[in-house]
Amino acid sequence: MITWKAEIDRRYVPADSTSSCYLRVSINVGKDAPQSRRLPLNLALVLDRSGSMSGSKLDKARDAAAYCVRQLGADDQVAVVTYDDTVQIVGPARAMSERAKRQLIDSIRHIRSGGNTNLAGGWLTGAQEVADHTDGRLARVILLTDGLANVGMTDPAELAHHAAELRARGVSTTTMGIGADFNEDLLERMARRGGGHFYFIENADQIPDMLHRELGETLTTVARGVTLEITLPFGVEADLLNDFESSGDHRHLRVQLDDLVAGESRAPVFRLTVQPGHEAATLPLTARLRYQDVASGATRELRDDNSALTYADQARCRAERPNAAVQEEAELLNVARARETALRYDAAGDYAGSAAVLNEAAQRLQAMPCPSPGAQAETAKLQAESEEATGGFAALRRKALHYSKANSLQNRQ
């Protein structure tokens, strides 16, 4: 069951000046959401087998892929694709009968490392295997790599564009980067545009856990094609603080939240800019949530018209006690954006600029009235990161910070 609520951090806005406030839409799927029916899975596992994957990385990837195959049912379809400078279909998309499972697992065991990294070729081959066999199934490509794309298509914008096109066809892309040498900006962008998830795997031992987690989430999908629409009155404009894909203009926004699984939460937060108006006049805000219920197959639409802003004088605006939880969540998203900016400075060699951005974010968070324990812990982390930034971040540390900010902006833990 999906529950949701739209909340603004304050009800009153000044009638005599431009102001800003925040709107949060909290969407929650119960952990005990009905699982009597799940969509069959249409999965492609795309494994990097370039030379840098030799040893424990490829060993763990093979083990994790074999585990995933074992967990699937006869109605699920799986393809396994590997790539180095060339692409090989280890197992074409087919239903997972017990015999097919045994054959595919045996083929996975024989995967060996090779040469360079044709990431695009491997990923798109896996995507085509999935796209050719959709038939109402839950379609996903999981790409696991430890290196830079250096053969074939390598332009990040082009790869992200293809990910978005696949998403429009119902095929999502999840990316998993291992170690210190992959391009985190590329993999995160492909996953975001592709409607999947991005993972940073620091060492080979984590590969099975991450792949198991992704498969487990996919198998408990409760709602598909989740979209949130926000409609604002004249005089109010919104900017989305999260990194969800969105379309429309500042008064009519459509946010794509894609699939939701049991126990999952999403909380898009919008910064509202409000132009001056007449005292006592109200500004109604409308939110609509649409999704396909997996259990019933029905399309649901929920509507919330309960949020509204009211123009008031300055004294009344100052006297209002704002919703601290909404304000804090907005500030934590601003912290994620600050990390994003700091990493850009770091990549350019401006370590002082990187440290200053992180320190400023820590000060803003610290200045909030009655910060939660989580916000206090985040302040301490920012202060430590600011000190660390003065000497530049090591490669693994950069990727960990990138992963942290990406998860924050996508509401993932």
Image (cartoon, helix red, strand yellow):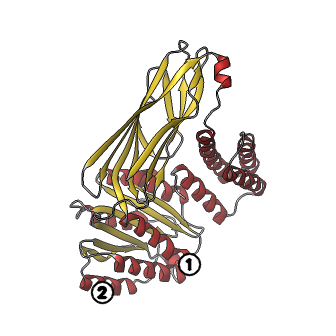
Residue under the point 32% across and 66% down: 125
**Residue placed most toward the observer, 177 or 31:** 31
* Residue closest to the eye, 38 or 149: 38
Image-quadrant location for residue 107: bottom left
Say which residue appears at 48% left-offset and 66% top-offset. 176
Q: Real-space Cα distance between discs 1 and 2?
A: 24 Å
Q: Is residue 121 visible from the viewing direction of this image?
A: no
Q: Within 10 Å of the Cα at label 2, are there few (<14), some (14-19), or many (20+) other Cα atoms?
A: some
Left or right of 353 on screen, residue 95: left
Rendered position, 124 above or below 45:
above
On the image, the x and y values in percent for residue 63 come to: 44, 82
Give the amino acid at mark 1: Asp
Can residue 226 be seen by looking at this rendering? yes
Residue 89 in the image, given as x and y percentages of width and height? 31, 75
Residue 229 x/y as whole percent: 39, 37
**Pick the front one: 52 or 108:** 108
Disc 1 target residue: 205
> Where 28 falls versus 232 (above or below)?
below
Secondary structure, mark 1, is helix
Looking at marks 1 and 2 on the same chain, the residue that comes earlier in the sequence is marked by: 2
Location of the C terminus by quadrant is bottom right
Q: Position of residue 131 (x, y in %)?
A: 26, 61
Q: Are marks 1 and 2 in contact (CB under 8 Å)?
A: no
Extreme residue in the left direction: 135
Q: Name the residue tied to disc 2.
A: 102
Determine the secondary structure under disc 2: helix
Displayed quadrant of residue 171: bottom left
